[in-house]
Amino acid sequence: MSDKRSEIQGQLISNLPMIILAGGTLYLASKILKGAGQTADEIAQALQLKKSDEQVKSEKQSQEAIERYVNEMPKKQKPTRPDGFWAQLAERIYRDTQFSAVGDAHDDARYCMTYVGNDADFALLYKYYGRRQETWLGIFPDGGLKDLTQAISSNLNKAQKQSINKNYARKGIAIRFV
């Protein structure tokens, strides 16, 4: 028993430099990754500050128009499915797009968008999606919070967005993605 114990101690001592090196490497990598995340945030903030007043005004007007649409549509039209369905679908779309391209299921997100049958449906899906954070590799924030239209526009490719737009045009839905 003591021979086995001294053999294990000997192996541990002989591998100690490698264990220390591995620990140091992990520590250094975590510091580099943390610094990269902070640098990316600083760059994003600097770019935000450089937006022209016209851009900010235009974005605000667009957001206000979407909010009006979302608030008015359920009053004008009856949704095709209950609220719980749209809440679950919003979560599924987020899971399909949350990692900024790495490991995402963009085609499933496109498919989920086709469940929308009228403007009231889209309004509810938009409402339940809210504003969510995308990340790189599940660690680093990718810009600011995004609403459903921003998530679809920034994640899906041109053909996927055109597919949604054609589907919505057939159904008479006003929303289009660019």
Image (cartoon, helix red, strand yellow):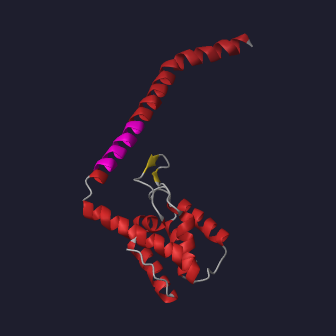
Displayed quadrant of residue 5? top right
Percent position of residue 169, x then y: 46, 86
Residue at left offset 48%, top offset 22%: 20
Displayed quadrant of residue 32? top left
Instruction: Please say whether residue 39 is one of the residues in the magenta stretch.
Output: yes
Q: Is residue 113 visible?
A: no
Q: Nearer the viewer, residue 92 or 30?
A: 92
Dominant secondary-structure state across the stretch colored magenta: helix
Percent position of residue 24, x then y: 45, 25
Residue at left offset 42%, top offset 37%: 34
Q: Is residue 147 visible?
A: yes
Decide: is 127 above or below 165: above
Looking at the image, the residue that sits furthest to the right is 1
Instruction: Report the span colored magenta.
Output: 33-46
Decide: is 160 above or below 21: below
Q: Nearer the viewer, residue 91 or 109?
A: 91
Percent position of residue 40, x then y: 35, 45
Q: How many marks?
A: 0
Q: Nearer the viewer, residue 134 or 4?
A: 134
Residue at left offset 60%, top offset 68%: 89
Percent position of residue 64, x then y: 42, 69
